[in-house]
Every structure is written in structure tokens, then in C-alpha cells.
Image (cartoon, rainbow, N blue to C red):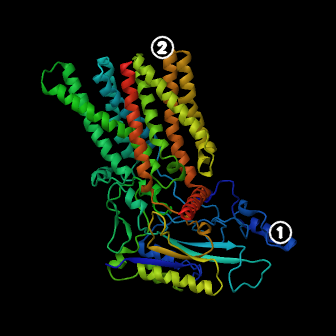
Amino acid sequence: MAATDIPGGPGRPKASEDRLDAIRNEASTTGKVVTGAGRAHASAPIREAEDYYNLPVLKPPTWTWEVPLYFFIGGIAGVSSVIAFVGHLFHADPPMVRVALWIAFVGTVLCPALLISDLGRPLRFLNMLRVFKWRSAMSMGSWILSSFGAAVFLAVATNELVLYGIQSPFLPALRWVGEFAGAVTGLLLASYTGVLIGATAIPVWHEHRRLLPAHFLTSGLGGSSAILEFFGFLVPATQILGFAAASGETLVGIMLELRHSRVDRPLHHGKSGWTMRIAGTLEGPIALFVRILWKGSAHGRYAAAACFLVGALCSRYAWIWAGRASAHDPQAVFESQHVAIAARKAAHRAV
Amino acid sequence: MTKAAFLTDATLCIGCKACEVACKEWNEVPDDGMIWTGFSYDNTQMLGASTWRHVMFLEQPAVAGPQQVDMENPFRWIFLSDVCKHCGNAGCLEACPTGAIVRTDVGSVLVQSDVCNGCGYCVVSCPFGVVDKRHPDGRAFKCTFCYDRQSAGMIPACAKACPTQSIRFGELDELREASVARVAELQGRGYTDAQVYDPLETSVGGTHAMFVILGQPDAYNLPPAPEVPTIYLKSAWTSALVSALVLVAIVCGAFLF
């Protein structure tokens, strides 16, 4: 750790002989212990605060840029396979079903690549499939992603073989199997990432564990229909899905904005807070209004789709940054846990 | 099989950092940076991938107990050697997707370095902020409870090196009793804010590394009510399944329209 990396913020004055001399001078002139500086000065002799030099209690997530990008792409790929299956079921335009399947397939190629490159030991990626653990969202995610990949490959391959003109009674049946399995695992893929970060020790993540899976699914839905629109499928279905997703994200934004405990600080302040706000406004209200105002125009729909995609992508990064900020804030840990202790005591008294 | 445990006593620690050094030497843990923090004599700051024992230095404007002389400017200097808690229900162990983190026969929690692939999920799943990824190695590391020494019939290096028996190593139930007895003794001698830190009431279910501390756990960066993150799984998965059903309904509606 470099000297500039002292936890507690870059604004904290470093201890130095000059600073110690200043404290000695102040102490000798006033005849008292120098306490007024409090936590602002690293080298003040006695701290009044009840924490440990404001150093973090928790370790911040070590995940690099690949992981939030994976959350984004995985969500889109997962919901695309749902759209493909349901579209096929309701006799939607076959080219659209085909493109939706291909979006999912591209996701199954990109997602493992992103995740493997984030690993500290990428060559050991297969260790993920050594065990199957219900109680580890990361383990479940590995199995979900693997089975999603297999299912989508089956669906895409059979679909392409049918389109190529190969006649076989097995192909359509296999295609249904692949599409159905892809839809089920796709739903899990697009939502488990919310569980993954929700079931951790990071206060801002576990505080919002109920919201995160719904939030990430909604982003996947809007992202998937936005990409379909960019492929030229300006049909009512993608318009409705775009409306639904932007409305959902508007609701998520309002819910987050209403929360103001210490734990929620990273959602409102600093890099994570502002990214979260701007991203949420883009994929929520802005995407919604653009879609309403120019609903008849192709350009309006492209603009709404672009707003949603950019917002959804930035929001994934904001959540990871919020997790880092949360881990660095010992007061978030203490406050939320003292609330829990008080609640437990109140429950004991009630009994 | 007996369960091994640490009992680390803040009222006996003299802040010599012999435990930190012994741990580093025995386990061949690499350098974790040389900086002067100004946080009393604590230049280690926190546990991490390459710091498995960490001696804390607390400077408090509080009455130390019966030894207090200057009542107008009360001051006490407390030391405590922090370590991996080897939780009863360990967040890192539950989270590990490769099975690299295991519960050993002595009840400790061990990261098997030959299996760990550095996914980093244990790092965010530890309610005590202990385990971390080591750069540029890429894998996660933490206190091994000197599993190698214990297997050979020796006590952990930190406990062996401690000159004041502030770090006691022994059988879990015996040390749990000893911690209560020690706090009662300290209370009787006028250390009225002495307490045991061993979160038995939360989902962590007690730890294999207990502490005797003066004052509140917050001051030692010990979470007052740590929870194993698996308790959040049920509500998160429920939300995921409910929202997945809603999403399917919306997609069906969009195509039926």
C-alpha cells in the first residue's frame, strides 16, 4: 500500500514531524491535550470518536470492470432468450425470434469471457464447476450461466439448421427444448446477479437485496428490447416492453431516492451517487418521456432505446462503486447493526 | 474431535506485535507495505491478504479502571491483536463457489490455495472484512489458524510468540468459559466496561477467535452485530422469482397485444 492510499480519504493530513511539532506547540501553549482536531487530523493525540480511526470494517469488492459489464450483458442475453421463447410461442415474426436468439448466443460467448478474465487465476475457471452450492449465489451463477449457454446453443443451432432447410422430426422438438430451457435459465441469469450482490456483507447491497433482482431484470428487459429495436424490429411488442422497462426503472429510481439512511449514502453522494442518479434518470424518466413524446417515429424509438442502454450500463457500474464506497464507510456498518440490535432488544421486550 | 480456538485479551496485550511478526515469518506472508499512519502505533491498520494478525492501538479519553491516577484528563491506551474470527457460520466458506474454503477437523476455516481461483466472492461475504485478494498473486488469503502447525501438534505461531499470554490457544468450550471468567474477574477489579466479543446471538453463531475487550466493539472495528450474508438469500431469491414471473407476464402481454 502506497503512502497516498491511507484509508479514510485523501483529504486526511499525513502524519509528519511538522504536524507533530504543531501538536506539541499547541499542547504546550494551551496546557491541554489537543482534542479539537478530532478525526480530521490523523496525528491528533486523542480521538473522541467511537470508531477505529475511521478505517473500514469491511473489504471492498475486488471485482474489476468486467463484472458490471457482465451484469449488463448477462441481463440482456437472459431476457432475450425469454423474448425468443415467448415470441416463438405466440407466433411472433420469425426473424425477430432468430435475432433474439442470436443476442442471447452472443451473450453466452461474452459473459464467460468477461468473468474468466476477472478471475485472479483465470486458468482455474473450471474450478467453478467443482461443487454445486445452493447457499453460494456465485456457485449458482456459474451453473446458471453454464446451463444457459448449453440451452441457447441448442436453440440457436437447431433454429439455424431448420432455416438451412434440414428436414428432421427431431429438430423442431429440440428447438423447443432449447428455447424453453434458455428462457428459464435466462430469467435466472438476468436476476441472480441481484441476489449475488444482495447476499453479501456490503451494507448498501444487502439493504437493497429485494430491489436488486427486480431492478436488474427490468434493465435486462429494456436492454434486450432496445437492441431488438436497433435491429429494426420497431413492432408494438418492443414498444410495449420498452415502456414497461422504462416505467419500472422510473419506479426504482423513485424508491432509491426516498431512502436516506447512512447505508444509502453511496446512492446519493460521490461518484457512485451521481452515476446512479444520471444513469437512473436516463433509463427511467428520460427513456420513458422520449418514448411517449415520439412514439410514432423511428428516431424517437432509437433515441429512447439508446438512453435506456446507456443508463442501464452505467447503473451497473454505479452499483459496484456504491458497494466499494459502502465497504469503506465504517459508520454504515455500525449504524445498520445498532439498528438491528435495537430491534432485537425491542422484540425481546415485546415477548 | 476437539475444536480449537483463540482467546485474545486486550487487557493483557502490550502491543509488541510479536504475533504479527511470528505470523509473517512462519507463514511466509509477503510484505504488506511500509507506511506511517499516525494512528497511534498502528501502522498495520487492518487485516488483509498479507496481514493475518493486526495489533490495534486505541487511545481513548476514558478511565482505564482502578489504575487511573489523573481523573481530570482520563486517558487509556488499549492494545488488541485482531485475527480471522473462524466463524461458527462463516460467510466466506458459504460464498466460495469452488469449494476452496473448507472447515477443517479443528473447526477452523481454511482457504486451500491450490483450489482458489480468485473470484473474490469471499471478500464481500466476510462480515468482519478479513479475507482479501492478494495482488498480483490473484488468490484470496487469510489466517490459516496455523493448520500446518496444529496438524503437527504445535500451537499457532502468534500464540506461541505472545509474551503475555494475551493470545491464548486452546479448546473452544474451555476458552469460552475462560473468557467469561476473565471478564468477571476484570469487572471485580474495577474494569467495569470489560466484555467478551463473541457474537453468539447473531447468525454468525459465535467465533473460534474470541476477544476480551474494554468498551464497545465499534472502537475496535469489530462489527457490533455481524451477520452471515446467507441470511439474505431467501428474501433476495424470493424477489428474483417473483419479478421473473412478472417479467414473463409482461412479455406474454406484449406479444398478445
Return the residue at label 2.
A298
Q: Chain of mark 1?
A: A
Q: Residue A341 occupies which quadrant of the picture?
A: bottom right
Which residue ends up furthest to the top in the rendered image? A296
Are the residues flagged by discs 2 and 1 in contact, CB closer than 8 Å? no
Q: Residue A57 occupies which quadrant of the picture?
A: bottom right
Q: Residue at x 48, y 37 (%)?
A: A215
Q: Please tell me if label 2 and label 1 are on a single chain.
A: yes
Asked whether residue A237 is in view, the answer is: yes
Alpha carbons under labels 2 and 1: distance apart: 70 Å
Along the horizontal axis of the image, is B76 left or right of A334? right
Q: Chain of mark 2?
A: A
Along the horizontal axis of the image, is B195 left or right of A141? right
| Image coords of residue B176 (percent x, y) | 46, 79
Q: Nearer the viewer, residue A101 or B135?
A: A101
Q: Nearer the viewer, residue B237 or A136?
A: B237
Sequence-first disc among 2 and 1: 1
Describe the element under mark 2 as helix, strand or loop: helix
Mark 2 or mark 1, which is nearer to you?
2
**Image quadrant containing the N terminus of chain A:** bottom right
Q: Residue at x 50, y 77 (%)?
A: B19
Residue B70 got which mark? none
In the rendered image of this protein, does residue A31 appear above or below residue B229? Answer: below
Query: Which amino acid type corresponds to the residue marked 2 in the rendered image?
Result: Ala
Badge 1 crowding class, 10 Å Cα cut-off, few under 14, some 14 to 19, many 20 or more, is some
Residue A26 got which mark? 1
Q: Residue A150 occupies which quadrant of the picture?
A: top left
Q: Nearer the viewer, residue A101 or B90?
A: B90
Which residue ends up furthest to the front in the rendered image? A351
Query: Which amino acid type corresponds to the residue marked 1 in the rendered image?
Result: Glu
